[in-house]
Amino acid sequence: MCGIAAISANKEALPFLLQGLEKLEYRGYDSAGITTIEGNHLFTKKAKGRLQNLKDLLKDENVLGHVGIGHTRWATHGIPSNLNSHPHTNNDETISLVHNGIIENYRELKEILILQGYQFHSETDSEVVVHMMDYYYKKEKDLQKALERVITRIEGSYALCIVSTIEPDKVFIAKKDSPLVIGKTADASVAASDIPAILDYTKDVYFLEDYEIAILNKGNVSFFDQYGNPIEKEITTIPYDNEAAQKGGYDTFMLKEIHEQPYAIAETLRGRVEGTDRIVLPELDAIHDKFKTFNKAYFVACGTAYHACLSGANILERLT
Ligand code: GLU
């Protein structure tokens, strides 16, 4: 899975971004990154591995921006690396974007964009979206309209949060088949992949639906349909505190994890299934030939995972 946190505020954005990403760590990730708007330029830092690596990078920085986006990545296209980490930026370095999900038609879009002169710096599917934002912004001269056009072109699943020096107070958001929850207080509006990330700020949240667009602008949030018509959305008041929210409304973490198994398996294999029944694990390509020489595999775990491993070992033994 992955985590997104975004904020437009009258105070510094970084504390919310880091705290939000921390609250989303349970979703699993392989790298992390942030962009804030600093005056008229984008300030971006990314680091492979734990969130702590990103925090270490930021330790001596004076990050003052009030608007920002953050991301913990679960790589589906391109290895976990600093270059593939989000946020991704357009060639003019005026637009920065985080994406959760998979852009299914990214190859064809990338080819078109390369013909238009766009340079790609990562192997991700996500990077096409930021260059398309740039492409349509140059046509429309309006970021919201550009986003509307982008979502008519991309196929697949996405939660997108976009910031730009062109409209430095705002975060532009769109989603399809990837979760995004939005909240606002008197002096800030925030968005995240899951409720625990924003619960310290507010219990009143909006759940963004597929193809809806949200714009965070300090203490204001506006919602639009995919054609740019304003829409009203209902506030949901979350009836539980942060600890209960982390348990997703279940009495115990164990119960939550049991119920999340189908989702967790689907998310773990996201981007690694070809057709309906072929699992592809490019991470193992480098040691593919060595497999033939192995005669023993160790499953290492403790607790409940130990019992899962006993079953796993049994299945592997039968299959091989
Ligand atoms: N598909 C994107 C990537 O591989 C986003 C993955 C995610 O949801 O974290 O970078």
Image: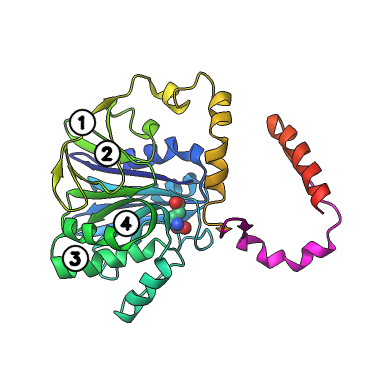
**N-terminal label among 3 and 2:** 3
State how far apart marks 1 and 3 are (Cα). 30 Å
Is 151 placed left or right of 316 in the picture?
Answer: left
Q: Is residue 24 left or right of residue 286?
A: left
Against 272, residue 8 (above or below) is above
Q: CA distance from mark 1 to mark 2?
A: 8 Å
Residue receiving disc 2: 190
Q: Are marks 4 and 1 in contact (CB under 8 Å)?
A: no
Circle 1/circle 2 CB separation < 8 Å: yes
| Quarter placement of the C terminus | bottom right
Please report whichever mark, 3 or 4, sits nearer to the chain's N-terminal start.
Answer: 4
* Position in image of residue 101 (x %, y %): 42, 52
Of the two numbered discs 2 and 4 on the same chain, state the one appearing first in sequence.
4
Which residue is pictured at 51% across the width and 63% down the height? 78
- Residue 137 bears which disc, if any? 3
**Label 3 sits on what residue type?**
Tyr
Give ligand 1's quarter of the image. Answer: bottom left
Q: Is residue 23 above or below residue 249?
A: below
Provide the secondary structure element on which disc 4 rests: strand
Q: Residue furthest front?
A: 276
Residue beneath label 4, please? 97
